[in-house]
Image (tube, helix red, strand yellow):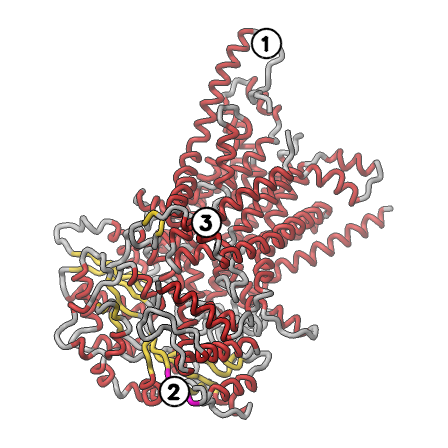
């Protein structure tokens, strides 16, 4: 009878499965075992045994080489002292801030140490999950940090996160494509638009801009806004200054690229991935410092060049400086130990760790003058020198806004992109929402 | 519905049988409750309790990170004026109204087609129709994005071959929702087809024989025999796919995240965004509760309209 | 007369095959594209022109995909088996047994079907946490079992179940539970098989819930691993993503091919009306 065959098949499948589980657990090496350990030990952090070490959870969103950097950092720290044991876990970036962190915090399971992006900074600041790190800086190191970088994370006089990198934006372009279309490297907005029109074909996008709402979307728009002379908030930081002709101009300019289909509304590579240029599916792309290493490693034979962001007639050159920050959970039971680790990592007298991060692991600008000086040689290599000599001085750290403000700006941008509103109408509509959110 | 034990009433009501019947009824009750118990507890804890809790949360101002603050029905007042919310409800309805009938007709059509087949072709044809169901949510989204890309997608390649111009699909506010519907139809037709197919096979052969002898056409047979006899299955598929269509989340999240320009921002996505991106947990719970009521009423209406009275 | 019938059949067969090919075309496309090199993966591909097995090797070696597949298999199979047992009992009780509160329980059960999952995540998370099931297989499995969809289908099925069989069991002196386990359940293949597939696939699909309650990567399930590849870092290796998608689709595809035969047989067996 057929009935019996199921009875045999199911236990057989289960057995196979167990074998598979065991096989994978032992076979797939280091990272797996480590994850295993942190999983089981995290659940019972209180009864650690005779030698009571403080266990700290450190959550992250980095991958690959960067993940490795932090893994090694944690290993080094765990070996260097015997008070604390840091447990490191990393998550998919898309889910990390949107799902993992809020849910864990709401359940009282939040990490002690975590990474935070400027786009989500205020969300956690408002709720009191960002500890003031000011008291923990070693002697003299605070002064070494770039004042603007610290300003961007200072709320009510508290330094609520540690900036450890500044990622600048520039205009990357394919030199051959520009030459073939007889286009000069654009320096002004008009030239950028003109170039995009000439470079766009069925297969090649003229200019890659981020099409989807989110923190990165706004991050890319701020330079346009500032170059035009627009502002999100007024000087007092409490009311909206979004409703202005300058904002409208920036919104309209941004929107034109999508309305004329010069910038694709759907990308196969993320807008932050230089692969759009590397795979020759785009002629120009606004992208950050992080792209440099990938160009050197993978796209050496593609003629990718770099220029400062174009500016409007009579505007001033501005770029945004982004980058994740190191944060300590203000509600952590071991706040001080957590802060000590963060300081050890990036605010120590010894600058080797931040230097390694910003030069070897990835390419970014450290937020500390002494580290920049120490790495001078590297900062003048290849495409990096464009950032160092032509872009760096115009950088403004990405501001931190309430999530509702971020949403309102993103909304205004999409409304204009898809032709629902003019820049003027959208600026006005967003202005009301921002004021509402700031109450 | 008369209360007849599964064994059926014995023909004569002798006292001995009656006593036996009574113990049988007791046994039946006890068995019934034992059978119900595991799922009853599970459903209560893992489904029902969370809804109640969500309703409780909806009466509060809560950012998930700090203690809740009771604000009564304020969230419900706010949502009644929230144009973005009603936009998302409109999008949800638009999605359902297109998706559900299409899925229903295409599944039933495929089932009839396969039912009409004879011989060697039956098995491979059924396999081909079913296979997309094995392609799960994120994978289907990946394939969708890959095929529908404005520049490198194969669909646009075909359109260009026939002289058309490239379409934006997922990047276009007017086309994105149809693109998502297409992907969902693709993976879901097979399974519903199988349910229809099983139901059609359950219909006794003699009915069709009789129809054939009476000289009924294929269409007449379908209208007068097959379709009415599928009533239970029809209701089931309609209700379940309608409910399902209100809850589509994974594919939208991977393919468009509600964009472009909110054109695929259905209610579930909006609720998720309010809850997790803006951390308005209280408000998000109120929205969730309204959506729940909406689905509830709609399903009741559907069941009243389509179900048989017995 | 015979030729006309033959022609109609041929037409139907041709239509079915064409539509069928259309249905599997995206899968074919996925398969051939997964074997392209990273440089060419986005080019439109109609025929298998490259065979870069390296893509698959990379999935196995450089990601924890195999571990995640193991996790997903374990979770999906456990959930499916337990759910089949619980739901068939529940559905049978609702359809065939008489007890006070039957309609009430049925309506209540049905109403739980209408709760969108994304909506109850936070409360569910808190409840699961209270049971100490965070970051564990139990947390992945237990809350996924309870689902009114399966119950509803079982109930529909048992309502049409032939009475004669139960009567025979009654006469033979079987208890009600015995009737269910010995007579009704073994004859329920035509509902159990599609539902088994449905449950397995649904659990293979789950993404949001595992994302919320797992912490260590050793517990990640397939969809998490896939989504991580698409949106994880500074670049999307499409060739690896597609290869991973192929690997992730294999278990469900195998299940389909294995269950196909039973699908038809099961249907034949209950045709005793």
Secondary element type, mark 3: helix
Secondary element type, mark 2: loop
By secondary structure, the bulk of the magenta-drawn segment is best described as loop
The residue wearing badge 3 is B288
At 57% from the left and 60% from the top, the residue drawn is B180
- Magenta stretch containing residue A317, yes or no? yes
The answer as to whether the residues below labels 3 and 2 share one chain is no
Badge 3: few (under 14), some or many (20 or more) residues near its Cα, within 10 Å?
many
Badge 2: few (under 14), some or many (20 or more) residues near its Cα, within 10 Å?
some
- Which percent across, then down, holds residue A268? 50, 71
The residue wearing badge 1 is B13
At 34% from the left and 88% from the top, the residue drawn is A385
In terms of depth relative to the viewer, which is nearer, A175 or A297?
A: A175
At 61% from the left and 50% from the top, the residue drawn is B100
As measured in the structure, the alpha-carbon distance from the residue carrying label 3 to the one carrying label 1 is: 54 Å
Badge 1: few (under 14), some or many (20 or more) residues near its Cα, within 10 Å?
few
Tell me the magenta residue range: A314-318
Where is the C terminus of chain A found, in terms of image quarters? Answer: bottom left
Farthest-out residue, top = B15
In terms of depth relative to the viewer, which is nearer, A152 or C51?
A: A152
Q: Which mark is residue A316?
A: 2
Q: Chain of mark 1?
A: B
Tag 2–tag 1 contact (CB < 8 Å): no
């Amino acid at each position: 009878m057929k009935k019996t065959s199921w009875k045999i098949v199911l236990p057989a499948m289960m057995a196979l499965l167990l074998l598979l589980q065991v096989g994978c657990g032992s076979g797939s090496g280091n990272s797996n075992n480590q994850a295993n350990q942190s999983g089981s030990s995290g659940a019972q952090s209180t009864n650690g045994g005779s030698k009571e070490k403080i266990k700290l959870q450190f959550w992250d969103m980095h991958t690959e080489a960067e993940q490795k950097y932090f893994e090694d950092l944690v290993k080094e720290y765990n070996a260097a002292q015997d008070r604390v044991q840091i447990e490191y876990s990393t998550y998919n970036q898309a889910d990390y801030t949107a799902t993992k962190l809020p849910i864990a915090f709401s359940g009282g399971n939040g990490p002690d140490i975590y990474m935070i992006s400027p786009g989500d900074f205020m969300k956690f600041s408002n709720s009191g999950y960002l500890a003031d790190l000011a008291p923990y800086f070693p002697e003299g190191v605070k002064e070494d940090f770039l004042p603007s970088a610290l300003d961007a994370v200072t709320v009510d006089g508290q330094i609520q996160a540690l900036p450890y990198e500044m990622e600048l934006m520039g205009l990357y372009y394919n030199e051959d494509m520009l030459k073939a279309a007889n286009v000069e490297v654009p320096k002004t907005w008009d030239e950028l638009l003109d170039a995009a029109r000439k470079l766009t074909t069925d297969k090649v996008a003229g200019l890659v801009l981020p099409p989807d709402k989110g923190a990165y979307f706004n991050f890319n728009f701020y330079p346009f806004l500032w170059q035009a002379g627009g502002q999100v908030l007024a000087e007092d930081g409490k009311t909206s200054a979004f409703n202005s002709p300058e904002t409208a101009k920036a919104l309209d300019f941004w929107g034109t690229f999508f309305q004329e289909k010069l910038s694709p509304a759907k990308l196969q590579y993320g807008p932050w991935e230089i692969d759009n240029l590397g795979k020759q599916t785009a002629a120009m792309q606004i992208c950050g410092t992080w792209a440099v290493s990938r160009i050197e490693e993978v796209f050496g034979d593609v003629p990718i060049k770099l220029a400062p962001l174009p500016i409007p007639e009579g505007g001033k050159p501005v770029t945004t400086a982004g980058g994740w920050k190191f944060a300590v959970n203000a509600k952590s039971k071991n706040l001080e130990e957590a802060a000590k680790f963060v300081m050890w990592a990036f605010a120590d007298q010894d600058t080797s760790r931040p230097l390694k991060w910003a030069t070897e692991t990835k390419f970014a600008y450290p937020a500390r003058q002494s580290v920049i000086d120490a790495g001078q040689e590297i900062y003048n290599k290849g495409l990096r020198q464009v950032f160092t000599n032509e872009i760096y001085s115009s950088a403004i750290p990405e501001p931190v806004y309430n999530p509702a403000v971020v949403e309102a700006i993103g909304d205004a941008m999409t409304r204009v992109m898809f032709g629902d509103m003019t820049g003027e109408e959208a600026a006005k509509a967003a202005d009301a929402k921002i004021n509402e959110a700031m109450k | 519905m008369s209360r007849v034990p599964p064994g059926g009433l014995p023909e004569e009501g002798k006292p001995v049988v009656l006593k036996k019947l009574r113990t049988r009824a007791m046994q039946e009750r006890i068995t019934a409750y034992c059978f119900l118990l595991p799922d009853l507890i599970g459903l209560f804890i893992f489904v029902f309790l969370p809804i109640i809790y969500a309703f409780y949360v909806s009466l509060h101002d809560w950012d998930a990170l700090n203690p809740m603050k009771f604000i009564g029905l304020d969230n419900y007042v706010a949502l009644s004026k929230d144009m973005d919310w009603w936009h998302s409800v409109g999008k949800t309805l638009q999605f359902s109204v297109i998706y559900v009938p299409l899925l229903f007709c295409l599944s039933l059509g495929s089932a009839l087609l396969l039912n009409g087949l004879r011989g060697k072709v039956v098995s491979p044809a059924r396999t081909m129709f079913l296979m997309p169901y094995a392609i799960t949510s994120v994978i289907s989204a990946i394939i969708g994005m890959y095929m529908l890309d404005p520049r490198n997608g194969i669909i646009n390649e075909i359109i260009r071959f026939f002289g058309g111009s490239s379409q934006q699909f997922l990047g276009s506010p007017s086309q994105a929702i149809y693109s998502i519907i297409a992907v969902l139809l693709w993976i879901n037709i097979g399974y519903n087809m199988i349910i229809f197919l099983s139901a059609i096979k359950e219909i006794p052969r003699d009915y069709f024989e009789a129809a054939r002898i009476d000289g009924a056409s294929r269409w007449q047979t379908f209208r007068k025999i097959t379709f009415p006899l599928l009533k239970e299955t029809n209701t089931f598929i309609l209700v379940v796919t309608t409910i399902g269509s209100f809850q589509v989340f994974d594919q939208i999240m991977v393919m468009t995240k509600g964009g472009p320009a909110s054109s695929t921002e259905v209610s579930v996505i909006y609720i998720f965004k309010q809850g997790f991106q803006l951390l308005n947990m209280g408000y998000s719970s109120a929205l969730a509760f309204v959506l729940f009521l909406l689905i509830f009423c709609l399903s009741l209406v559907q069941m009243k309209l389509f179900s048989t009275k017995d | 007369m015979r030729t006309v019938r033959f022609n109609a059949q041929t037409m139907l067969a041709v239509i079915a095959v064409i539509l069928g090919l259309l249905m599997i075309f995206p899968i074919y496309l996925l398969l051939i594209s997964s074997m392209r090199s990273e440089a060419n993966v986005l080019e439109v591909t109609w025929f298998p022109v490259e065979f870069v097995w390296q893509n698959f090797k990379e999935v196995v070696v450089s990601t924890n995909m195999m571990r995640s597949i193991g996790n997903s298999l374990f979770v999906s199979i456990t959930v499916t088996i337990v759910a089949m047992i619980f739901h068939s009992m529940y559905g049978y009780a609702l359809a065939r047994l008489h007890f006070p509160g039957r309609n009430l329980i049925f309506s209540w059960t049905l109403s739980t079907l209408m709760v969108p999952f994304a909506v109850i995540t936070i409360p569910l998370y808190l409840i699961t946490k209270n049971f100490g099931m965070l970051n564990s297989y139990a947390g992945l499995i237990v809350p996924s079992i309870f689902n009114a969809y399966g119950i509803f289908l079982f109930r529909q099925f048992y309502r049409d179940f032939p009475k004669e069989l139960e009567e025979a069991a009654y006469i033979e002196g079987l208890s009600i539970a015995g009737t269910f386990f010995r007579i009704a359940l073994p004859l329920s293949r035509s509902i159990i098989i599609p539902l088994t597939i449905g449950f397995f696939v649904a659990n293979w699909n789950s993404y949001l819930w595992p994302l919320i309650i797992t912490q260590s990567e050793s517990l990640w399930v397939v969809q998490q691993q896939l989504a991580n590849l698409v949106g994880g870092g500074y670049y999307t290796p499409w060739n690896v993503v597609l290869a991973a998608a192929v690997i992730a689709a294999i278990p469900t595809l195998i299940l389909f091919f294995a269950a196909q035969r039973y699908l038809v047989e099961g249907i034949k067996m209950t045709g005793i009306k």
